[in-house]
Amino acid sequence: MTSKPPTRERILDAATDMFGVRGVDAVSLDMIAADVGVAKQTLLYWFPSKDDLVQAVLVEAASELTIATEAAIRATGDDPLDRIEAVVRAVFRPAVRRPALLGLIREVSRLSPAVGERFHAELRPLVDRAVGYLQKEMDRGRIRQADPRLIAALCYATVTGIATEPELLRSVGWQPTTADLRRLRSELLAFLRAALAPAPRR
Amino acid sequence: MTSKPPTRERILDAATDMFGVRGVDAVSLDMIAADVGVAKQTLLYWFPSKDDLVQAVLVEAASELTIATEAAIRATGDDPLDRIEAVVRAVFRPAVRRPALLGLIREVSRLSPAVGERFHAELRPLVDRAVGYLQKEMDRGRIRQADPRLIAALCYATVTGIATEPELLRSVGWQPTTADLRRLRSELLAFLRAALAPAPRR
DNA sequence: CCACTTGTCTACCATATGGTAGAGAGCGGG
DNA sequence: CCCGCTCTCTACCATATGGTAGACAAGTGG
């Protein structure tokens, strides 16, 4: 029954949302505790310090994205552009359900090096595989020739940027309605496809 | 005399850097004051509150980018892809000289609505012109057909994302050397060109 | 029934932060 | 010479924050 998720999980959930939306520094342990409906010391019981909590939140976010991504890859055919589209869709879904997820990842650069290091260790295998895959498909001529590492970073920057900058979208008159959301996703996918498609020989 | 820029400017400069790098919340007035070499109350003399300081910093950043952008546009020829490249280069230069600039803009979404509103008012004309321009060039068939508002947002997200995520680049093995920086810029430009070029008729 | 563990709480504390009050230095004009 | 203005400072303050100490209740095993 989901009527009573364990305290630790509820803390982790609330912290993920709040950190992602308002930033780690702007969210105090008291706020999280109030949101969960528990005393601050219960928080500190489960996570001995705020850093520990942040780290746990990041590790879980990374794992969530990794799982979604790998499932998407396994469920898709051979064409690299299709595969990339599947990954983007897979990342978009949790990001929409929980807008804080990607915003949270943007926080990493601000945190203590130790926390950042841990987070990277978590994501490293995923990144390496993605880069390797891009390289292979470039060699086969099914993706535009380029530096696969930077292509990976650029795709990530585009997706994360567009998904975590509500202000940006607002300033071009975008509204967070379902219809606009769908259009955004389809424009994003078209954008990436165009950016990645092999150069047409003229 | 230029040997000792006025206090107000020095405060603004230091605040821009520190806010951009570590985030508004993580930088205290004391830190900025110490960095400038002045008492905190001098800060509060020039900017009656932290919010005022943040706002001033944002307005100046927006103006700096606007000026660089408009100069780049005026100095470039007719082809839209060339023009977009010029703008990206123009934005990249201040962003590299002062890595905090773009990071700062990412902060807007976290601040009080009033501050964000003011910032948008500052940038609105620039955005509107960019969107209008994209629309026009799409009509003329010199840019891939798409929603010009979202294309503007996507380009912005890509550039900002890649320029403000040192962690992201680190995780794909990128180093902030001059050579790597040049390569990054050229890959970014190729990426955008591919994403924006009109669809090749097959 | 007792020792021990688990989980949550109340009561504090040291520190850092944004901000206030007001003094004093230098300076130009009357 | 003194008034008032600009600018910077020292001295505080109220609050919020991350974190510690330890009490208390509810199991759980022997």
Image (cartoon, coloured by chain):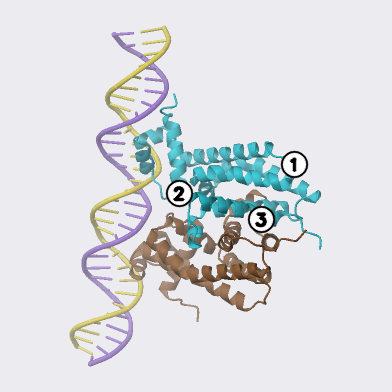
Chain colours: A brown, B cyan, C yellow, D purple
| Residue B42 sits in quarter | top left
Residue lying at 45% horizontally and 43% vertically, measured from the top left: B17
Check residue B63 in the rendering and tell me which mark sits there, or answer none: none
Check residue A175 in the rendering and tell me which mark sits there, or answer none: 3
Q: CA distance from mark 1 to mark 2?
A: 36 Å
Whole-percent x, y for residue B157 in the image: 60, 54
Q: Which residue was labeled with disc 2?
A: B21
| Element type where label 3 sits in the image | loop
Foreground residue among A6 and C10: A6
Q: Amino acid at mark 3?
A: Gln
Circle 2: is it few (<14), some (14-19), or many (20+) Cα within 10 Å? many
Give whichever of discs 1 and 2 has the lower sequence position: 2
Q: CA distance from mark 3 to mark 1?
A: 33 Å
Check residue B78 in the rendering and tell me which mark sits there, or answer none: 1
| Element type where label 2 sits in the image | helix
Labels 1 and 2 within one chain: yes
